[in-house]
Image: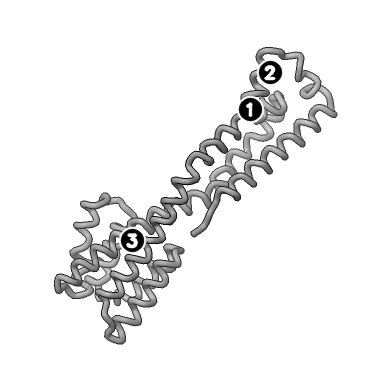
Amino acid sequence: MSYTFYQSKPVFLAALPVCLIYPFLIKKTLVEKRREQLLEQFKEALSTLSSFLSAGYSTENAFRVSVPELKHMFSEDALIVREFEHFTKGMDLNKPLEDMLSDFAYRSGLDDVSNFAEIFIAAKRNGGNLVQIIAHTSGIIRDKVQIMEDIKTLNASKQYEQKVMNLIPFVIIIYMNLSSPDFFMTLYTQTLGRITMTVCLLLYCLAVYLANRIMDIEV
């Protein structure tokens, strides 16, 4: 950006610390991706739990025997595997499963997990049909994940077009600087030109921000 809009070494050196802010700018995006991944894995975990409960396992044993299945389904480092291993270790230390589920729901930041934890705790304490509850919850999450995947599929081409459009201003300016260096010289040497490029940079950042907001569709 410093080369495209300013072509100034002092500006490059002054803007270099901004790179340290970049991880914080993409933090929300990374968090959302991890939550989507966790929701997908949680959906499969509920299906696994439901199958073991239907086979006659107790609730605690169903969580224990689900760990190897989830490792085979995903990986040993998967988010849901680590959570289920945490449940298993906690139960070995006589920690209530309900408390660990509530903690997991809080840390996940997912409404579906929170709703499941609340219903699961109420059903376990009051003697509800856990098999039916887990199967119903799994079906709801499965439908939600399917809708999210459909939206991603429909928006895939638009997102690709957005990424291409984000690069076009840089390509045009760099091409003009390489092919006709004198064409944009006044924009890099005069005060009014630098102000103009700064305004263009701000408009570009605003356009990228608005495009990301438009493409961000929540389910």
Quarter containing the N terminus: top right
Q: CA distance from mark 1 to mark 2?
A: 10 Å
Picture disc at residue 176: 2
Quadrant of residue 142 within the rendered picture = bottom left
Q: Amino acid at mark 3?
A: Phe
Q: Report if the CB atoms under discs 1 and 3 are less than 8 Å apart.
A: no
Q: Is 169 situated above or below 154?
A: above
Marks 1 and 2 close (CB-CB < 8 Å): no
Amino acid identity at mark 1: Phe
The front one of 181 and 159 is 159
Residue drawn at x 31%, y 81% is 123
Residue 56 tag number: none
Few, some or many residues within 10 Å of mark 1 (<14, 14–19, 20+): some
* Amino acid type, callout 2: Met
Left or right: where 149 falls relative to 8: left
Dividing the picture into quadrants, the one containing residue 85 is bottom left
Residue where numbered disc 3 is placed:
42
Of residues 55 and 113, the one nearer the viewer is 55
Q: Position of residue 45 (x, y in %)?
A: 28, 61
Mark 2 crowdedness (10 Å alpha carbons): few <14, some 14-19, many ≥20: some
Q: Which residue is mark 1?
A: 170
Kindly give the residue lying farthest to the left in the view shown.
56
Left or right: 177 in relation to 49: right
Sequence-earlier tag: 1 or 2: 1
Query: Is label 3 in a helix, a strand or a loop?
Result: helix
Q: Please tell me how many numbered marks the rendered image carries.
A: 3
Q: What residue is drawn where x is 43% and y is 56%? A: 147
Which residue is nearer to you in this view: 100 or 116? Answer: 116
